[in-house]
Image: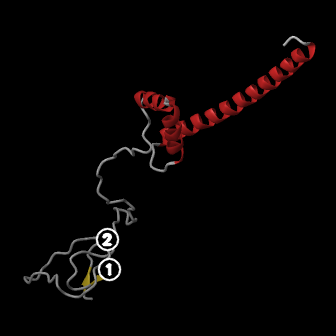
Amino acid sequence: MSKKCPKCGTDMADNAMFCGECGTKFENKSSEPYNFNNNQSQQNYTNFNSNNQFNNQNYAPNYGNFPNPLTTPMSLGEYILTMIIFAIPIAGFIMMIIWSFSSNVNLNKKNFSRASLIFYIISFIISMIIIFFFVGFMSIVIEEMAREGLI
């Protein structure tokens, strides 16, 4: 290692084109071109700012911020369409179960389906309780009427 970096003073290989510490480009004073086919390992370059502090910046290409279809908010039309599908007697209930427990469904539709499913289950339980009370009450009334001879 006979070459020194003019900026930071780090010893470098003779054929180095950049400093491995500060990234300074070396002037190639020899007339022979750089040999890319040699078996030397590639140097690790780091990115330092002007204060010799490491600049931890992500250099990945930016392809744009595309919205994630699983987390984008549902529009009013999508909510209305979902409610229309839920109103179909058997198919709506099946779709409600599929959307509630599927992993590749919009998060808003999944939560709306889960809330609707919970609401329908609670409504079914309450309606069954009311029906049982009504049937029990009517059986008592009919039994009393039969005992008094009104029926």
In the rendered view, does 136 fall on the left or right side of 96? right
Observer-nearest of 62 and 26: 62
Task: Tell me the crowding category of disc 1: few under 14, some 14 to 19, or many 20 or more residues within 10 angstroms, Cα based.
Answer: some
Measured as percent of width and height from the top left, residue 43 is found at: 29, 79
Q: Quadrant of residue 133?
A: top right
Q: How many marks?
A: 2
**Extreme residue toward the left, this view:** 31
In the rendered view, does 118 fall on the left or right side of 85? right
**Which tag, 2 or 1, sits closer to the chain's start?**
1
At x 90% / y 12%, what residue is drawn? 149
Observer-nearest of 3 and 106: 106
At x 31% / y 71%, what residue is drawn? 22
| 27 shown above or below 52 | below
**Quarter of the image where the C terminus is located:** top right
Measured as percent of width and height from the top left, residue 118 is found at: 62, 37
Measured as percent of width and height from the top left, residue 150 is found at: 87, 11
> In what element is the residue under mark 2?
loop
| 39 shown above or below 77 | below
> In what element is the residue under mark 1?
loop
Measured as percent of width and height from the top left, residue 63 is found at: 28, 51
Which residue in the protein does label 2 denote? 22
Observer-nearest of 124 and 32: 124
The amino acid beneath tag 1 is Thr
Q: CA distance from mark 2 to mark 1?
A: 9 Å
Asked whether the beta carbons under mark 2 and mark 1 sit within 8 Å of each other, the answer is yes
Q: Which disc, if any, is residue 10?
A: 1
